Image (spheres, rainbow, N blue to C red):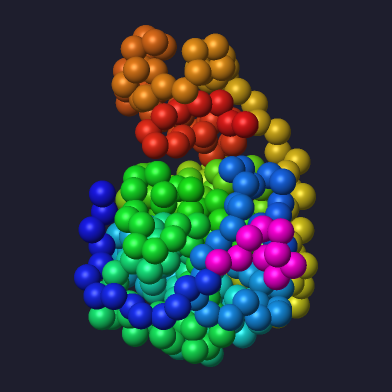
Amino acid sequence: MFHIFSIVYVMDSRYIACDDPSFPPKLLNPNIKPKVKGLWYKGELSEGLFEKTVAIIGSRNMSRYGVQVLAEIVPRFVEAGFTTISGFMYGIDTEVHRLTLENGGKTVAVLGYGIDHDIDVENNNMYHKMIESGGLLMSEYPGKTGGRTWTFPQRNRIVVGLSDMIVVAEAGVKSGSLNSASWALRQGKPIFAVPGSIFSMTSEGSNILISEGKAISLTLARLYQALEKDEDYLYSQKARINSQKSRLSDPESTLVALLRLEGPQMLNELSRSYGKPVGEVSAMLMSLLLRGEVSEERGMWGVAK
């Protein structure tokens, strides 16, 4: 169990079901699985809040480079009228929310724990500002439900679902942002990643996404040109991502066939079944996850539905 917060944020939460006319229509995408049946939220579901949206995500272990990247890209998206979406965890997430508010924009936080969960003083202040500025706090989980290892990856499908595009600002190979990228591929959302130094572990995941063709390299020059002259460019990348067919190597095909035959398995169990070292199997699973071929839930790996 995650013990993250300490002070209660007092505000009435409300629930909206997926059949409510005010439910965010982007979350009705049939490629979002499991289906989002409803959400708890704080704030006002104002018209237009989700009209233009971008999820800006990344590592909790944010580097100075990550701070510099966000200081450049977040104000640009806000100025262009985008609502920012992120996960309200420390690191990249909270910096995205903070910079959005600082630049007069609206931001939505999708939580991986209950909507009424206790929080600390600093984030309590940010909660107030987010709601006062017209943003939202959202969660699938009621009350003070605690975060679990599986609630955060499940939360990511909602972050992606609410967004028109995903920007990975900085991510290591074990970052939850790679899980978000896999959701984006399954949902047909364009993915952009900010390239980083080959010497930086906090950019290794971002660089992998780019090198494997899962994400478009987002340079400042490309972003400025798109936002100022050709905003459709950002959306047009969806066609490129969707047109990329996943080609499995023979070992990957064998691994997928094993999962299909024997059903979901833990990593160690799968390593024994497949007859390969845990590290090798783990690397293959991560690659397959990014391509939407497999899924992981509560430590169990299986074929993506």
98 is higher (above) or lower (below) than 147: below
Considering depth in this image, is 148 or 285 the residue closer to the camera?
A: 148
* Residue at 30% from the left image edge and 60% from the top image edge: 61
Q: How many marks?
A: 0
Q: Is residue 206 visible?
A: no
Considering depth in this image, is 302 or 15 the residue closer to the camera?
A: 15
Overall secondary structure of the magenta section:
loop
Left or right, 16 with respect to 259, comes to: right
Q: Position of residue 252 (x, y in %)?
A: 53, 20
Q: Position of residue 14 (x, y in %)?
A: 53, 71
* Residue at 26% from the left image edge and 62% from the top image edge: 4
Please check the rendered image and state whether residue 156 is part of the magenta-colored stretch, yes or no.
Answer: no
Left or right, 17 with respect to 42, comes to: right
* Residue at 76% from the left image edge and 72% from the top image edge: 230
Q: Quadrant of residue 217?
A: bottom right
Q: Quadrant of residue 276?
A: top left
Q: Quadrant of residue 19?
A: bottom right
Magenta region: which residues?
15-24
Q: Is residue 131 visible?
A: yes
Considering depth in this image, is 192 or 78 the residue closer to the camera?
A: 78
Q: Position of residue 270 (x, y in %)?
A: 39, 18
* Residue at 34% from the left image edge and 54% from the top image edge: 147
82 is higher (above) or lower (below) than 237: below
